[in-house]
Amino acid sequence: MSDSSILLISADDEVATNVTSALEKIEKARVSRESSSVSQLNGAAVAMAADHDVVIFATDPSNAADLTAIELLTDQRKPGTIYLALTDGDLPLSKARALSRAGVDDVLPYPLSNDELVMQVNEMLAKKRAEFTESFSGAGARNGHLFAVQQARGGVGATTIAVNLADQLLNRKGAFKKEAGNKVVIVDFDLQFGTVGDFLDVDQQEGLLQLASENFIPDAMWIEQSMTRLPSGLAVLAAPSSFVPLEAMQPAQIEGLIKTLKTMFDYVVVDLPRALVNWIEPVLAETDQLLIVTDMTVPAVRATRRLMEFVLADNAQLPIEVVINHEKKPMILREHHREAAKALDVTFHYWIAHDPKAAREAVDYGKPLSEVSARSDIAKGIALMAKSILTAFPKERAEVRV
Ligand SMILES: Nc1ncnc2c1ncn2[C@@H]1O[C@H](COP(=O)(O)OP(=O)(O)OP(=O)(O)O)[C@@H](O)[C@H]1O
Ligand SMILES: [Mg+2]
């Protein structure tokens, strides 16, 4: 299903040639090599190692410098990354234990046959995958809430609101607001024109393209490997760089993706495409609240009305909030506000001020408003919205569900 990236760290060319040629037999594996010993790895290489699914390194566990280096390497561990040590044939148990304490998942005796190497790596990959998936089932499962953000017209500010809402749902705590209180992911389902990645300075990601072009149901490990995590803790599943035919995505894939995301995160925020794609249904079926972002212009209010009718036709019970962007909450509703509320049969709870400077700054820096202009009216408006959402939808664990 997903490709496995394997990094081999070895200063020895002969070892590297042998091991690489064996690893290339693993289906869908991309093998790269770092020509260095573990103890001489530079910081950049250490950080880069964690982007691989498997890291294999030659080591002599009698060497204290190696053990320290391995600890450093495995400290950067991402869930799912496998660390395998390649050591000389007969390893005493005490040495194997030292390696395991340093964070190594398994020890491979060198030399070993190609078949054995391939088998071991495949087994580890399958085991990790199963463990990881398992960790989000039963007691480990979250019961996340899903918020889908839709726009009444192009450019009205849906992505701005989705991204900053997700950021605020982190509910950061501590003196420097560094600790995320909640696990939150933002997913860019605007596959063709999505800008979530730009707003958060995250590279485009090919995960969703792969999902659309290969017909598989994503599991937790695939999701984990396809996402980026920001320093704030926010997880981002960005849109791909190349063109995705929207209809290639199968509703069952989106359903699987969303259901699994809900077991992994407390809050899932989805930026929807403007087009009403055939996989919108599974999104709506799992949505706790649909946020339609609009302004008070007549065409946008009419588009909101049409969207609501479309959505409610098949999901009569779906809670919808209409978010008014580019306008501060007025002290008293004006005539056109009242008319819009009546036409839509809603009460407007969320008003986000028009603040081009703050909006622009956030985009230019590729950061959420909270980090660039937290005191702006637009940031405050979104923070208030997040607060009321957190109150209305407190985070849940699957086990407390009745
Ligand atoms: N409240 C606001 N005040 C001022 N500018 C805003 C506000 N909200 C969004 N913007 C700006 O408007 C532009 C469009 O915003 P955004 O990309 O969020 O809209 P969108 O509805 O997602 O558009 P698209 O149709 O491209 O998906 C951006 O430059 C953004 O910074
Ligand atoms: Mg957008």
Image (cartoon, helix red, strand yellow):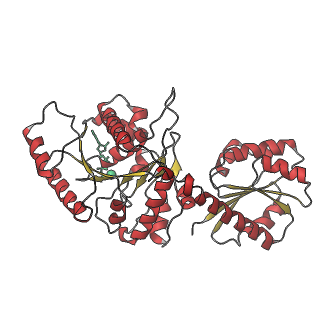
Reply above or below: 179 against 66. Answer: above
Relative image position of residue 228 (x, y in whole percent): 52, 50
Give the image quarter of residue 112: bottom right
Task: Locate residue 316: give its quadrant.
Answer: bottom left
In this rendering, the answer to whether 245 lies above or below 376 is below
Residue 51 is situated, as x and y percent measured from the top left of the image, at: 62, 53
Q: Tell which of 50 and 132 is nearer to you.
A: 132
- Which of the two residues, 144 or 103, is positioned nearer the viewer here? 144
Most foreground residue, 191 or 98: 98
Is 51 on the left-hand or right-hand side of 8? left
In percent of width and height, residue 155 lies at: 27, 49
Spot the residue most to the left: 335
Identity of the residue drawn at 86% across and 62% down: 110
- Pick out the residue farthest to the top: 175
Residue drawn at (63%, 50%) of the image: 78
Q: Quadrant of the N terminus?
A: bottom right
**Is residue 89 positioned above or below 146 on the image?**
below
Task: Tell me if residue 56 comes above or below residue 213 in the rendering.
Answer: above
Q: Residue at x 40, y 72 (%)?
A: 248
The quarter of the picture where residue 43 lies is top right
Q: Is residue 60 visible?
A: no
Q: Is residue 31 left or right of residue 167?
A: right
Tell me if residue 126 can be seen: yes
Residue that appears at 41% across and 41% down = 169
Q: How many marks?
A: 0
Determine whether, in the image, residue 29 is placed left or right of residue 13. left
